[in-house]
Image (cartoon, grey):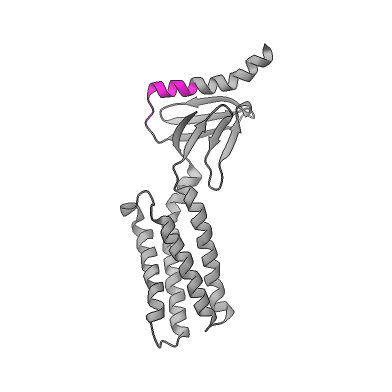
């Protein structure tokens, strides 16, 4: 089996948008915490302070994640914190507010849960694998598998990996790891052997 780490546009855009989504969640938390404070008739701010704290963490992480958490080690933890905060806040608002006051809170709890799941894949290393069965390409929600008989050629270079489909389509990915000339030669030879092998057997 051979592997090469690449950049995949859809996953890269998901990584870039994660910070913005944290900011959106933070702002929504502030808005809903303020609504809850209003429903309490401004009598005490203590129940609302934890929500404001999570909102502040979300905003700071959204704006500065690339500076102090390049590999997004804490992204999942903050998403989980957001989910729990929305759920607790939603239950609290249910006891003092109307349906319209808390329905949006539970919707955001669900959306943050979906982000928690999807971003676990988004922030994983994006690596293409080549083995005897075919080529496995990482995706946003699941890996894509391409069999060798669906490919006419695979070209591996130091900068790009290109997969040519028999239906005249091709997929190209930018390489993000350092590959030696020997590694490139071995991968190209392996891919050519897997593609040509069945053809030689059929002609034989």
Residue extending farthest left:
68
Image position, residue 68 (x, y; %): 31, 54
Q: Is residue 166 magenta?
A: no
Residue extending farthest top:
204
Q: Is residue 59 above or below residue 128?
A: below
Image position, residue 109 (x, y; %): 52, 66
Is 27 displayed left or right of 105 in the figure? left
The image quarter containing residue 55 is bottom left
Q: Is residue 70 above or below residue 91?
A: above
Image quarter of the C terminus: top right
- Seen at 50% across and 78% down, the residue is 92
- Seen at 35% across and 55% down, the residue is 65
Q: Is residue 180 magenta?
A: yes
Q: What type of secondary structure mainly makes up the magenta span? A: helix
- Seen at 65% across and 15% down, the residue is 201
Instruction: Write down the region rendered in magenta.
Output: 178-188
């Amino acid at each position: 089996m051979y592997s090469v780490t690449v950049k995949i546009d859809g996953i890269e855009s998901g990584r870039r948008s994660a910070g913005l989504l944290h900011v959106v969640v933070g702002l929504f938390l502030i808005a809903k915490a303020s609504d809850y404070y209003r429903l309490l008739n401004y009598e005490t701010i203590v129940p609302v302070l934890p929500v404001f704290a999570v909102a502040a963490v979300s905003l700071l992480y959204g704006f500065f994640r690339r500076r102090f958490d390049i590999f997004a080690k804490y992204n999942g933890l903050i998403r989980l914190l957001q989910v729990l905060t929305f759920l607790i806040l939603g239950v609290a608002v249910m006891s003092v507010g109307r349906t319209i006051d808390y329905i949006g809170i539970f919707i955001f709890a669900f959306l943050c849960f979906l982000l928690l799941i999807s971003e676990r894949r988004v922030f994983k290393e994006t690596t293409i694998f080549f083995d005897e069965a075919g080529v496995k390409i990482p995706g946003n929600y699941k890996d894509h598998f391409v069999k060798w008989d669906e490919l006419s050629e695979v070209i591996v270079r130091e900068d790009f990996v290109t997969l040519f489909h028999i239906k005249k389509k091709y997929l190209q990915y930018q390489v993000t790891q350092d590959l030696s000339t020997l590694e490139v030669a071995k991968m190209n030879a392996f891919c050519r052997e897997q593609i040509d092998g069945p053809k030689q057997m059929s002609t034989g």
